Amino acid sequence: MNGSTHSAENPLRVAVLISGGGTTLRNLIEKIAADQLWIKITMVVSSTAKAKGLQYATDADIPSTVVDWSTYDSTESFSTAVFDACRAAQADLIVMGGFLKHVLIPDDFENRVINIHPSLVPSFCGAGFYGAKVHQAALDYGVKVSGCTVHLVDNHYDHGPVVAQQSIPVLPDDDAAALAARVFEVECELYPHVLQAFAAGRVTIDGRKITMR
Protein backbone atom coordinates (compact mmCIF):
# COMPACT_ATOMS: atom_id res chain seq x y z
CA MET A 1 0.00 0.00 0.00
CA ASN A 2 2.94 2.36 0.52
CA GLY A 3 2.86 5.08 -2.14
CA SER A 4 -0.34 3.94 -3.88
CA THR A 5 -2.21 7.05 -5.02
CA HIS A 6 -5.84 7.12 -6.04
CA SER A 7 -8.37 9.81 -6.91
CA ALA A 8 -12.09 10.36 -7.20
CA GLU A 9 -11.85 9.08 -10.79
CA ASN A 10 -9.60 6.16 -9.81
CA PRO A 11 -10.84 5.15 -6.35
CA LEU A 12 -9.25 2.70 -3.96
CA ARG A 13 -11.07 -0.62 -4.24
CA VAL A 14 -12.27 -1.76 -0.82
CA ALA A 15 -13.96 -4.85 0.59
CA VAL A 16 -15.86 -4.35 3.84
CA LEU A 17 -16.23 -7.20 6.34
CA ILE A 18 -19.24 -7.17 8.67
CA SER A 19 -20.91 -9.38 11.26
CA GLY A 20 -23.84 -7.31 12.49
CA GLY A 21 -25.72 -4.07 12.07
CA GLY A 22 -23.39 -2.51 9.53
CA THR A 23 -23.29 0.99 11.03
CA THR A 24 -19.67 1.45 9.94
CA LEU A 25 -20.57 0.31 6.42
CA ARG A 26 -23.48 2.76 6.35
CA ASN A 27 -21.17 5.59 7.42
CA LEU A 28 -18.70 4.81 4.64
CA ILE A 29 -21.46 4.61 2.04
CA GLU A 30 -22.69 8.04 3.17
CA LYS A 31 -19.18 9.54 2.98
CA ILE A 32 -18.70 8.17 -0.53
CA ALA A 33 -22.07 9.59 -1.61
CA ALA A 34 -20.99 12.99 -0.25
CA ASP A 35 -17.78 12.85 -2.36
CA GLN A 36 -15.64 12.79 0.78
CA LEU A 37 -13.91 9.46 0.10
CA TRP A 38 -11.85 8.25 -2.85
CA ILE A 39 -12.90 4.64 -2.35
CA LYS A 40 -15.22 2.22 -4.09
CA ILE A 41 -16.72 -0.61 -2.06
CA THR A 42 -16.50 -3.56 -4.43
CA MET A 43 -17.72 -6.24 -2.02
CA VAL A 44 -19.32 -6.67 1.39
CA VAL A 45 -18.50 -9.95 3.12
CA SER A 46 -20.59 -11.01 6.10
CA SER A 47 -19.79 -13.79 8.54
CA THR A 48 -23.51 -14.53 8.91
CA ALA A 49 -26.61 -14.29 6.77
CA LYS A 50 -28.37 -12.67 9.74
CA ALA A 51 -26.25 -9.50 9.60
CA LYS A 52 -28.60 -6.55 9.21
CA GLY A 53 -25.79 -4.64 7.53
CA LEU A 54 -26.28 -6.68 4.37
CA GLN A 55 -29.34 -4.53 3.67
CA TYR A 56 -27.13 -1.43 3.42
CA ALA A 57 -25.12 -3.17 0.71
CA THR A 58 -28.30 -4.13 -1.13
CA ASP A 59 -29.71 -0.61 -0.91
CA ALA A 60 -26.46 0.84 -2.30
CA ASP A 61 -26.19 -1.76 -5.10
CA ILE A 62 -22.95 -3.13 -3.64
CA PRO A 63 -22.26 -6.83 -4.25
CA SER A 64 -22.32 -8.90 -1.07
CA THR A 65 -21.63 -12.46 -0.04
CA VAL A 66 -22.02 -14.50 3.12
CA VAL A 67 -19.11 -16.60 4.36
CA ASP A 68 -20.85 -18.30 7.26
CA TRP A 69 -18.20 -18.99 9.87
CA SER A 70 -20.35 -21.71 11.46
CA THR A 71 -20.01 -23.89 8.37
CA TYR A 72 -16.21 -24.05 8.49
CA ASP A 73 -14.22 -26.50 10.57
CA SER A 74 -11.18 -24.27 11.14
CA THR A 75 -10.03 -20.67 11.25
CA GLU A 76 -7.77 -21.45 8.31
CA SER A 77 -10.57 -22.63 6.01
CA PHE A 78 -12.83 -19.75 7.06
CA SER A 79 -10.05 -17.24 6.42
CA THR A 80 -9.34 -18.71 3.01
CA ALA A 81 -12.98 -18.30 1.99
CA VAL A 82 -13.12 -14.70 3.24
CA PHE A 83 -9.99 -13.63 1.38
CA ASP A 84 -10.94 -15.54 -1.75
CA ALA A 85 -14.08 -13.38 -1.89
CA CYS A 86 -11.98 -10.23 -1.46
CA ARG A 87 -9.58 -11.30 -4.20
CA ALA A 88 -12.48 -12.00 -6.54
CA ALA A 89 -13.66 -8.42 -5.91
CA GLN A 90 -10.14 -7.15 -6.70
CA ALA A 91 -9.97 -5.34 -3.37
CA ASP A 92 -6.90 -3.17 -2.74
CA LEU A 93 -7.76 -2.83 0.95
CA ILE A 94 -9.98 -4.75 3.37
CA VAL A 95 -11.92 -2.75 5.95
CA MET A 96 -13.32 -4.49 9.00
CA GLY A 97 -16.55 -2.87 10.14
CA GLY A 98 -17.84 -4.67 13.20
CA PHE A 99 -16.38 -7.97 11.99
CA LEU A 100 -16.27 -10.20 15.05
CA LYS A 101 -14.62 -13.35 13.70
CA HIS A 102 -10.94 -14.16 13.85
CA VAL A 103 -9.15 -14.49 10.53
CA LEU A 104 -5.58 -15.27 9.55
CA ILE A 105 -4.05 -12.73 7.17
CA PRO A 106 -2.54 -14.28 4.02
CA ASP A 107 0.79 -12.97 2.78
CA ASP A 108 -0.73 -11.10 -0.16
CA PHE A 109 -2.94 -9.08 2.19
CA GLU A 110 -0.25 -8.17 4.74
CA ASN A 111 -0.66 -4.48 5.68
CA ARG A 112 -3.83 -4.36 3.57
CA VAL A 113 -6.42 -5.11 6.27
CA ILE A 114 -7.55 -2.43 8.73
CA ASN A 115 -9.91 -2.39 11.68
CA ILE A 116 -11.33 0.16 14.08
CA HIS A 117 -11.59 -0.66 17.79
CA PRO A 118 -13.63 1.38 20.30
CA SER A 119 -10.85 2.02 22.80
CA LEU A 120 -7.35 3.44 22.90
CA VAL A 121 -5.33 0.32 22.06
CA PRO A 122 -3.58 -1.36 23.86
CA SER A 123 -6.18 -0.67 26.58
CA PHE A 124 -9.38 -2.72 26.71
CA CYS A 125 -8.73 -4.77 23.61
CA GLY A 126 -8.05 -8.34 22.56
CA ALA A 127 -10.18 -11.47 22.51
CA GLY A 128 -13.56 -10.93 24.15
CA PHE A 129 -13.39 -7.14 24.10
CA TYR A 130 -16.12 -5.95 21.75
CA GLY A 131 -19.23 -3.80 21.87
CA ALA A 132 -20.50 -2.74 25.28
CA LYS A 133 -17.90 -4.94 27.01
CA VAL A 134 -15.15 -2.53 25.94
CA HIS A 135 -16.90 0.54 27.32
CA GLN A 136 -17.97 -1.12 30.56
CA ALA A 137 -14.38 -2.25 31.15
CA ALA A 138 -13.17 1.32 30.65
CA LEU A 139 -15.76 2.64 33.10
CA ASP A 140 -15.01 -0.08 35.66
CA TYR A 141 -11.32 0.80 35.50
CA GLY A 142 -12.11 4.47 36.03
CA VAL A 143 -10.20 5.91 33.07
CA LYS A 144 -10.66 9.60 32.33
CA VAL A 145 -10.27 9.32 28.55
CA SER A 146 -11.34 6.73 26.03
CA GLY A 147 -11.69 6.81 22.26
CA CYS A 148 -11.04 4.69 19.21
CA THR A 149 -8.10 3.21 17.34
CA VAL A 150 -7.63 2.42 13.67
CA HIS A 151 -5.00 -0.28 13.26
CA LEU A 152 -3.66 -2.72 10.73
CA VAL A 153 -4.80 -6.27 11.32
CA ASP A 154 -2.41 -9.12 11.98
CA ASN A 155 -3.11 -12.65 13.21
CA HIS A 156 -3.94 -11.57 16.78
CA TYR A 157 -6.94 -9.62 18.06
CA ASP A 158 -6.35 -5.84 18.12
CA HIS A 159 -2.59 -6.30 17.95
CA GLY A 160 -1.55 -4.84 14.59
CA PRO A 161 0.28 -1.52 14.25
CA VAL A 162 -1.69 1.62 15.17
CA VAL A 163 -2.53 3.93 12.26
CA ALA A 164 -4.49 6.62 14.13
CA GLN A 165 -6.27 7.26 17.41
CA GLN A 166 -8.82 9.78 18.63
CA SER A 167 -9.58 10.37 22.30
CA ILE A 168 -12.65 11.70 24.09
CA PRO A 169 -13.21 12.47 27.78
CA VAL A 170 -15.07 9.99 29.94
CA LEU A 171 -17.79 11.94 31.71
CA PRO A 172 -18.77 11.37 35.37
CA ASP A 173 -22.30 10.27 34.50
CA ASP A 174 -21.37 8.04 31.55
CA ASP A 175 -22.74 4.53 31.35
CA ALA A 176 -21.60 2.03 28.73
CA ALA A 177 -24.31 3.06 26.25
CA ALA A 178 -23.56 6.78 26.54
CA LEU A 179 -19.83 6.25 26.20
CA ALA A 180 -20.34 3.91 23.24
CA ALA A 181 -22.47 6.50 21.44
CA ARG A 182 -19.88 9.24 21.87
CA VAL A 183 -17.01 6.97 20.82
CA PHE A 184 -18.96 5.95 17.73
CA GLU A 185 -19.34 9.61 16.77
CA VAL A 186 -15.56 9.97 16.55
CA GLU A 187 -15.24 6.58 14.83
CA CYS A 188 -17.48 7.93 12.07
CA GLU A 189 -14.96 10.71 11.42
CA LEU A 190 -11.65 8.93 12.10
CA TYR A 191 -12.21 5.83 9.96
CA PRO A 192 -13.07 7.76 6.76
CA HIS A 193 -10.18 10.15 7.47
CA VAL A 194 -7.76 7.22 7.59
CA LEU A 195 -9.27 5.59 4.51
CA GLN A 196 -8.92 8.82 2.57
CA ALA A 197 -5.25 8.99 3.62
CA PHE A 198 -4.73 5.46 2.29
CA ALA A 199 -6.50 6.35 -0.95
CA ALA A 200 -4.41 9.49 -1.39
CA GLY A 201 -1.14 7.63 -0.79
CA ARG A 202 -0.44 9.51 2.43
CA VAL A 203 0.24 6.47 4.62
CA THR A 204 3.75 5.06 5.03
CA ILE A 205 4.23 1.71 6.79
CA ASP A 206 7.58 0.77 8.33
CA GLY A 207 7.07 -2.23 10.60
CA ARG A 208 5.02 -1.03 13.56
CA LYS A 209 5.75 2.62 12.78
CA ILE A 210 3.05 4.13 10.59
CA THR A 211 3.13 7.71 9.37
CA MET A 212 -0.02 9.36 8.08
CA ARG A 213 0.57 12.70 6.37
Image: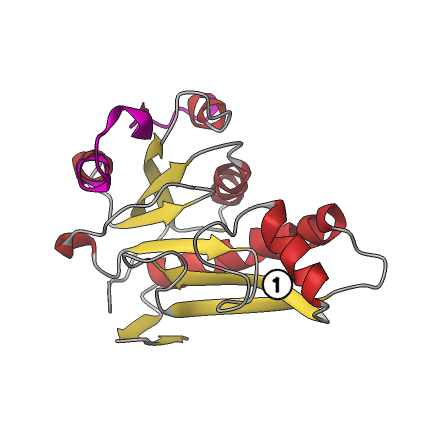
Residue 82 in magenta? no
Give above or below for 141 relative to 117.
below
Report whether 129 appears left or right of 39: right
Question: Dividing the picture into quarters, in which one does residue 74 lie?
Answer: top left
Q: Residues within 10 Å of mark 1 (few under 14, many from 20)?
A: many
Report whether 54 appears left or right of 175: left
Magenta stretch in the rendered image: 59-79
Report whether 136 appears left or right of 190: right
Question: Dividing the picture into quarters, in which one does residue 81 lie?
Answer: top left
Image quadrant containing the C terminus: bottom left
Image coords of residue 190 (percent x, y): 54, 59
Residue 76 in magenta? yes
**Residue positioned 58% across, 51% down in the render:** 188
**Residue positioned 24% across, 44% down in the render:** 91
**Type of amino acid at the residue the image marks with label 1:** Gly
Q: Nearer the viewer, residue 41 or 114?
A: 114
Q: Nearer the viewer, residue 213 or 180?
A: 180
Image coords of residue 70 (percent x, y): 32, 26
Image coords of residue 96 (percent x, y): 40, 46
Give above or below for 117 relative to 67.
below
Q: Nearer the viewer, residue 9 or 98?
A: 98
Image quadrant containing the N terminus: bottom left
Question: Farthest right residue?
Answer: 173
Q: Is residue 170 in view?
A: yes
Q: Is residue 11 in view?
A: no
Give above or below for 33 relative to 128.
above
Please give the residue where the numbered disc 1 appears in the rendered image. Answer: 147
